[in-house]
């Protein structure tokens, strides 16, 4: 019996070590393969305009790229609404689709022109019934990130909540399942991995970057 245990112990250690040594590498390889696949399949031209790759060369999110568990995912509509809603991914995809070519400008100087497809944020809020006192929409994300936009701007500019970029489902890097496409607003208004849309009457609300000094208007100067 004894010799067998002597053999068992080193092999167990070897197995444990190999997990420890290679699991990170495997995860990176999977991410790299997914990004390459996305690059191969995404649309790169739209009505004569060149599109940028949806997945940029680096990630600047506060806690890294988030992976959302779609089994339990719900988009909550809360605050100054007639009824709180918890919508599934499929509930959102049933709304009328809108497609638009829009450039995202980050304050740090880079930009990306991407073909977005999604639904009107207003259409989602209307499902819950917007109460008359509401003037601000606060987006809460899975990573704890928050940002806000005036309700009127969302309605007047037909801002969309995107579920697709360059013809494919949003990649995790761009906020799968949903990203706010805050057209004409700086990048920090484009909440990724959105899980709650809150209607508020606090027009001075300041989100994650706004409370750290970024301008709350965030208009793109061109
Ligand atoms: N949930 C979440 N959304 C976020 C951020 C974040 O850290 N967390 N960063 C914002 C900033 S500062 C920018 S510039 C854009 C970048 O989007 P992209 O890298 O996917 O193009 O995401 C915005 N949305
Ligand atoms: Mo940004």
Image (cartoon, helix red, strand yellow):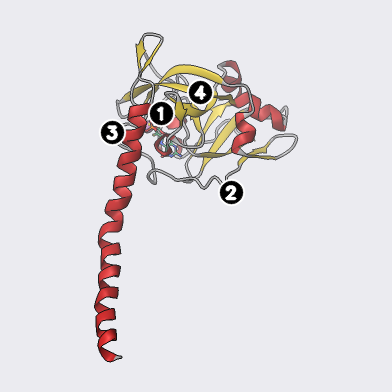
How far apart are labels 3 and 1 at the CA level?
Answer: 16 Å
Tag on residue 72? 2
The x, y position of residue 157, in whole percent, is: 55, 16
- First reached walking from the N terminus: tag 3 or tag 1: 3
Q: Is residue 107 something one can see in this rendering?
A: no
How far apart are labels 1 and 4 at the CA level?
Answer: 17 Å
Name the mark nearer the viewer: 2 or 3: 2
Say whether residue 137 is left or right of residue 64: right
The residue located at (54%, 24%) in the rendering is 160
Q: Is residue 146 something one can see in this rendering?
A: yes
Figure quadrant of residue 48: top left
Residue count near mark 3 (Cα–Cα under 10 Å), binned few <14, some 14–19, many ≥20: few
- Camera-side residue: 75 or 140? 75
Contact, mark 4 vs mark 2 (Cβ under 8 Å): no
How far apart are labels 2 and 1 at the CA level?
Answer: 28 Å
- Camera-side residue: 41 or 174? 41
Q: Which residue is mark 1?
A: 187
Secondary structure beneath dot 3 equals: loop
Q: Which residue is mark 4?
A: 117
- First reached walking from the N terminus: tag 2 or tag 3: 3
Above or below, 29 against 147 in this view is below
The residue located at (41%, 28%) in the rendering is 187
- Camera-side residue: 98 or 193? 98
Residue count near mark 1 (Cα–Cα under 10 Å), binned few <14, some 14–19, many ≥20: many
Q: Is mark 1 within 8 Å of ligand 1?
A: yes
Q: Quadrant of ligand 2?
A: top left
């Amino acid at each position: 019996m004894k010799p067998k245990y002597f053999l068992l112990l080193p092999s167990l250690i070897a197995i444990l070590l190999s997990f420890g040594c290679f699991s990170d590498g495997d995860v990176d390889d999977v991410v790299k393969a997914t990004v390459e696949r996305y690059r191969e399949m995404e649309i790169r031209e739209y009505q004569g305009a060149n599109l940028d790759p949806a997945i940029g060369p680096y990630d600047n999110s506060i806690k890294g790229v988030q992976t959302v568990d779609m089994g339990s995912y719900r988009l909550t509509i809360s605050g100054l609404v007639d009824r709180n809603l918890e919508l599934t991914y499929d509930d959102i995809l049933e709304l009328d689709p809108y497609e638009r070519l829009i450039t995202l400008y980050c304050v740090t100087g880079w930009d990306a022109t991407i073909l977005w497809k999604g639904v009107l944020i207003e259409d989602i809020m209307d499902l819950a019934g917007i109460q008359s006192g509401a003037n601000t929409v606060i987006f809460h994300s899975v990573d704890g990130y928050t940002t806000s936009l005036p309700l009127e701007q969302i309605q007047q500019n037909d801002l969309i909540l995107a579920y697709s970029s360059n013809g494919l489902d949003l990649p995790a890097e761009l906020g799968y399942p949903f990203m706010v496409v805050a057209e004409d607003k700086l990048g920090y208004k484009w909440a990724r991995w959105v899980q709650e849309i809150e209607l508020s009457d606090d027009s001075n609300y300041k989100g994650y970057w706004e409370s750290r000094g970024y301008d709350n208007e965030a208009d793109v100067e061109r």
